[in-house]
Amino acid sequence: MTTPQAPFQQQAYQQPPAPQQNAGAGFYTSPIPVRRATLGDAIASEWTKIRSVRSTIWTLGVQIVLLLAIGLLSAIAVDVSDSDLGSTPVLSLGFFGVLLGSICVITLGVMTIASEYGTGMIRTTMTACPSPGRVLGAKAIVFFLLTFVLTTVMTSVVAVLQTAILDADTPSGSDWLRSTVGVGLYIATLGLLSLAVGALIRHSAGAITIMIGVVLLPLVLAIFMFAESLAKLQEWLLEYSIPNQLSNFYDTSVTGSGPSGWEPLWIILGVTAVAMGGAYLAMSRRDV
């Protein structure tokens, strides 16, 4: 005689019912519209990056301090000592502040891209935007506009204050344009050259060292060339050194020869274009 099984025992050995498939269910649809990424998206991303890191605040902050401090102290020193500038343009007193401030722009230009290689963030950047040209172009546009606007505004402020302190004659329009907008374009382009070197070297300290050497080494080498056989090389290094090219925007050339007017800008633009082309090819081969 068999004993009937308890209800709970029957439940224990029963197979669970198979889950029913919802035939009407489809794929998840995001409420955010999906579209192709554009250069504008990359620019917005790079702007968020560059304005949210401390290196930008520190480097550009130091540049502002150097431009203001050196430019105004030079004017005050001339005013207190009652020195006669003679034929020296009053706007040229801002040259040394701009030259030292260019080191800050060089540093930021290198770190804009080389720091991502150091931290490994470049992998995230290239995953989000697999186009090396778009990434490099967005970084270049954001960096160039930021440094150009800041340098131009600050050199304009310093020029106005220097003219007021020394009670000097108002410089001509062409002098104002070259010592403000021209200097801003030159310094921003020099920063782009640093960005390209940072993309090629992929090491912040190494790229910054190379760029400081590019700025200062030709002038230092020329100073110590005493042999007559090196006279032509010495003259060439002096004429085409970055400090001398930058001084031409203030009509105070060290050698009195070489590039003049807007020629230094075309030279640095040509060199930077070649370097940016090399950076694009390097990123296309290594990071894709």
Image: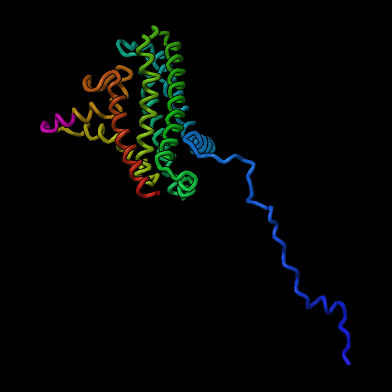
Residue extending farthest to the left is: 229
Region rendered in magenta:
227-234
Asked whether residue 50 appears in the rendered view, the answer is no
Front one among 125 and 18:
18
Residue 229, magenta (yes or no): yes
The scheme the figure's colours follow is: rainbow
Rendered view: 74 above or below 12: above
Q: Residue at x 36, y 37 (%)?
A: 194
Above or below, comparing residue 247 to residue 116 in the picture: above
In the depicted view, which residue is nearer to us: 151 or 254? 151
Query: Which of 6/267 is in front?
Result: 6
Q: In this picture, is 243 found above or below 117? A: above
Q: Position of residue 98 (x, y in %)?
A: 39, 25
Q: Could you tell me if residue 227 is visible in this image?
A: yes
Picture quadrant where residue 158 is located: top left
Residue occupying the point 45% across, 11% down: 164
Front residue of 209/164: it is 209
Q: Residue furthest bottom?
A: 1
| Residue depicted at 44% across the width and 49% down the height | 118
